[in-house]
Image (spheres, rainbow, N blue to C red):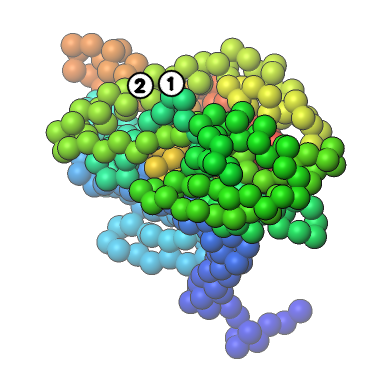
Amino acid sequence: MLESPDMKVTPRVRGILGFGLVAASLLLLGFVSKSMLAVTLVIVLVVFVHELGHFMAARITGMKATEFFLGFGPRLFSFRRGETEFGVKPILAGAYVKLVGMTNLDEVDAEDEARTYRQQSYPKRLLVASAGSLMHFLMAFIGLLTLFAFLGDPVVEEGSWEVASVLEQENLAEQSAAARAGIQRGDRILFVEGQSTAAWEDLVEIIRNRPNETVQLEVMRGDSELSLMATLGVGPDGYGLLGVRGQQATELVKYGPLEAVSQSGAEFATMVGQSIRGIWTIVANLGDVADRIISPPNDPSANDNLETRPVSLVGAVQIGASERLSGSERMQLFVAFNVFIGVFNLLPFLPLDGGHIAIATYERVREGRTGRRHIIDTTRLLPVTYAVVAFLAFFGLGAIYLDIANPLGF
């Protein structure tokens, strides 16, 4: 079929169409859930900052970066600044920076050889390879400072409880009594008809014995005490229903600048240790992980043990968008996500950043005091690299399936 010149899609038109496709997808996600859109954009930002770390380190050390793209797949649009092409691709699940001469397998023009990654000193290669994880750690530390100094650290109050969530409906036709009364997440129900509900069991017992009755609730919301009227519903067993779930009450504790820095450092170290133990737990229980990944939809056992339950970006969005999370809890999730990704990327296997760090370290050890540059033959590592890629693909795609088929109940 012949094509007239007027029918050709120019790069500019393709870029406009591509940008429109990405924007439309994000708008559709925002229409479904604004919270999910916000969490998705945060994850995209985290991915971008990771690669920005590599790019900035490469520029500082004099290495040549030819591409910096957000996303994977076909190029939607791009522009060139100096020697680097910047652009966006449609699958916003990652990003990459292309440095010339990463391994001995890369063909490089003679004039660029001095600026290749493989020809740089060990400290420079170490900085560039670890820059992505360092950016994750920086974001995590800033998140912890924000948590401790401004949002407040949620500290559990022993012996107290609060409303964890309000059931919107008792059945398909009616709102729950709590929803009609205006009870909100975080409220503390102190009294029902003058009877103390200091313990969750007290509330359950009082409500069960008053089906269809209109009761007066004394509620503490922040620093204000409210009096609300609620007409209780009736459950299938004939007992009264209010329509709330309870959880241990938490108090938001804020710190001064110096104490916030100290708390952030201590919590960061703790979370790094937790991430290392979490990775080891998954590795030590691969059989259990595999069973979960191939579990059928709506399998009640798929989410039994969260220590060996992998979570994909889909699951991270589901958790982060949950209405049950407070601002402080979302910040804790943001910090934990960055710490885990930062630690995971340092595992000493290609194609992870830690693989490049391990190679650079091995090469430096082989060089010893001779001063002669040693460059490893990467072809010897290809079988292991392919195995790691296959495992990560199985693990990643399996986690996505698991988060769709058996989502976490957040």
| Image x and y of residue 145, in percent | 26, 39
Nearer to us in this view, 325 or 56 = 325
Nearer to us in this view, 111 or 377 = 377
**Quadrant containing the C terminus in the rendered view:** top right
Q: Which residue is mark 1?
A: 274
**Quadrant containing the N terminus in the rendered view:** bottom right
**CB atoms of marks 2 and 1 within 8 Å:** yes
Q: Amino acid at mark 2?
A: Thr
Q: Secondary structure at mark 1?
A: helix
Nearer to us in this view, 381 or 306 = 306
**Label 1 Cα neighbours within 10 Å, binned few <14 / some 14-19 / many ≥20:** some
394, above or below 169, in the image: above
Name the residue located 54 percent from the left edge and 55 percent from the top edge.
Answer: 228
| Image x and y of residue 30, in percent | 56, 64
Q: Which residue is mark 2?
A: 270
Name the residue located 83 percent from the left edge and 40 percent from the top edge.
Answer: 238
Nearer to us in this view, 52 or 343 = 343
Q: Amino acid at mark 1?
A: Gln
Name the residue located 43 percent from the left edge and 24 percent from the top edge.
Answer: 158
Residue 299 visible in image? yes
| Image x and y of residue 151, in percent | 32, 45
* Most distant residue in the left direction: 258
Q: Secondary structure at mark 2?
A: helix
Quadrant of the image occupied by residue 5? bottom right
211, above or below 180, in the image: above
Name the residue located 68 percent from the left edge and 82 percent from the top edge.
Answer: 3
224, above or below 302, in the image: below
| Image x and y of residue 358, in percent | 38, 21
Q: Is residue 257 left or right of 86 when viewed as pictured? A: left
Q: Is residue 170 left or right of 389 when viewed as pictured? A: right
121, above or below 169, in the image: above
